[in-house]
Image (spheres, helix red, strand yellow):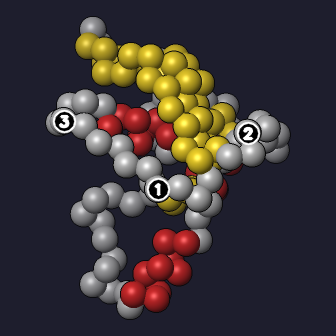
Amino acid sequence: MTRRDLSDTSNVEVLNLHKSFKNHKVLNNVSFSIKKGSIFALLGQNGAGKTTIIKILSTLLAPDGGQVNVCGFDVKTQGRHVRRSIGLTGQYASVDDLLSPISGNTYASRASVAF
C-alpha cells in the first residue's frame, strides 16, 4: 500500500477535477482541499455537481480528469484503500432512530473521513 504524502493539513485534495456525461460537462476544473479536523460544506443548486463530487471522492464514479486524493490515496488507482479509510451515508439512510446519541457518534467516528 503506497500512500501519497499529503500536506500535513489535508485529508482530501482535489485538483482540476473534470467529469462529463455524454456531451454535458458536469465538473470543469474543480479544485479544493479539506483540512484534517475541519468541517466542510459542499453547497450548490440542484444540478451543480455536488453528488458527482461525492461519488468521485468515494470511488463510486471515476473522474474524467484531474487529481483526487482521499486520506493520501488516489481515487483512480487506490480505490480499495480509499474505501477502507472513509465512511459514506446517504442523506436519507440515517440510523438515528435506531441508535442512541452515543452509539450514533461512535458509529460515525470510526472512519478517518466521513462524507
- In this rendering, does residue 50 appear at all? yes
Q: Which mark is residue 6?
A: 2
Outermost right residue: 2
State the residue at coordinates (75%, 45%). Answer: 8
User: Which residue is denoted by mark 1 in the rendering?
Assistant: 39
Residue type at the position of mark 3: Gln
Q: Which mark is residue 94?
A: none
Q: Residue 9 at x, y = what percent?
A: 68, 46
State the residue at coordinates (47%, 79%). Answer: 105
State the residue at coordinates (31%, 71%). Answer: 94
Q: Earlier in the sequence, mark 2 or mark 1?
A: 2
Quarter of the rendering occupied by the C terminus: bottom left
111 vs 5, nearest the viewer: 5
Task: Work out how far the residue at label 3 is from the one at label 1, CA to CA, in angstroms.
Answer: 20 Å
113 vs 34, nearest the viewer: 34
User: Which residue is denoted by mark 3 in the rendering?
Assistant: 45
How crowded pointer 2 is (Cα within 10 Å; few <14, some 14-19, many 20+) is rated as: some
State the residue at coordinates (32%, 86%). Answer: 98
